[in-house]
Amino acid sequence: MNNRSFLFPVLLVAAATFTGCASAPSSSSESPAASGWTTLLDGTRGMENFDAVGDSNWTAADGAIQADKRGKDTGFLVSKKSYGNFQLVVEFWSSPDANSGVFIRCANPKAITDKSCYEGNIFDERPDPSFGTGGIVHHGKVIKPQKAGGKWNTMDFTAFGSVMVVTLNGVKTAEIDHDQFASGPFALQHGKGVIKFRKVMIKPL
């Protein structure tokens, strides 16, 4: 049995559970600790779980961690821990002109790029929309085009072995079978425009 044949049913179950963020624990049900989830960012709390890399001005305001300008280098919040197989939920708000993304399994936490990580893109105005918002840059073209600008969104990642699925607001937007990066930290990007992150949760698989 090949790797994809074994992993795909597992991944489908995990991704299906995610639809509408149903798998994320709520205050009225099980706690994050009990369900296996770890909350790394919650409103303006949790910056200690990340290292800032680059020149963006990350600030805590209005119930979120946000950035709206940068210097010469693109800015990232890089998780202090590394992850291999996991489910990740990121709630974000982006301006229509924002260039952002969530980079997973990064090879080098000090040098985050779309060629040394898998990038779940947040870029409504990308010149080539094939890998625009919801796509996995270089690897997974957008299945169903989505726009994120001007509203709160939820981006979900399921990574198990070589198979990765991205959903945006409950819609599957990308899926790949690619084994270049097996584990590493993840990073939240600010490249252009305004980006706000108000919730980041992860669950190892």
Image: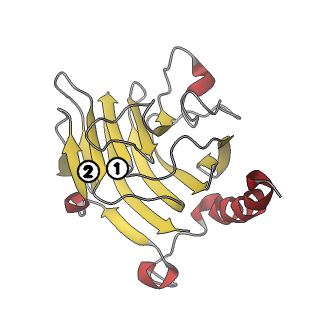
Work out whether mark 1 precedes mark 2 in sequence or the reverse, and give the earlier one.
Answer: 2
Residue at label 2? 65
Q: CA distance from mark 1 to mark 2?
A: 5 Å
The amino acid type of the residue labelled 2 equals Ile
Relative height, residue 73 to residue 119 (above, below): above
Q: What residue sits 45% from the left and 64% below the top?
A: 202
- In the rendering, at what x and y percent does residue 14 appear? 66, 64
Residue drawn at (39%, 59%) of the image:
200
Q: Residues within 10 Å of mark 1 (few under 14, many from 20)?
A: many
Q: Quadrant of the N terminus?
A: bottom right
* Quadrant of the rendered image containing residue 94: top left
Which residue reaches farthest right?
1
**Spot occupied by residue 171 in the image (x, y as percentages of width and height):** 67, 47
Left or right: 4, with 49 as reference point: right
**Residue drawn at 59 percent across, 56 percent down:** 158
Residue 30 or 38: which is nearer the viewer?
38
Q: Quadrant of the C terminus?
A: bottom right
User: Of helix, strand and loop, which one carries label 1?
Assistant: strand
Crowd band around label 2 with a 10 angstrom C-alpha radius: few (<14), some (14–19), many (20+): many
Q: What residue occupies the far front of the structure in this picture?
A: 1
Tell me the SS state at disc 2. Answer: strand
Name the side, left or right, on which 86 lies relative to 161.
Answer: left
Quadrant hosting residue 27: bottom left
Q: Residue furthest top?
A: 127
Amino acid tagged 1: Phe
Name the residue rendered at 50%, 85% in the picture.
30
Q: Which residue is mark 1?
A: 197
The one nearer the camera, 11 or 122, is 11
Q: In the rendered structure, are the residues bearing label 1 and label 2 in contact, judged by CB atoms less than 8 Å apart?
A: yes
Residue 19's label in the rendered image is none
Residue 105 in the image: state x and y as whole percent: 45, 48
Q: Position of residue 193 (x, y in %)?
A: 32, 28
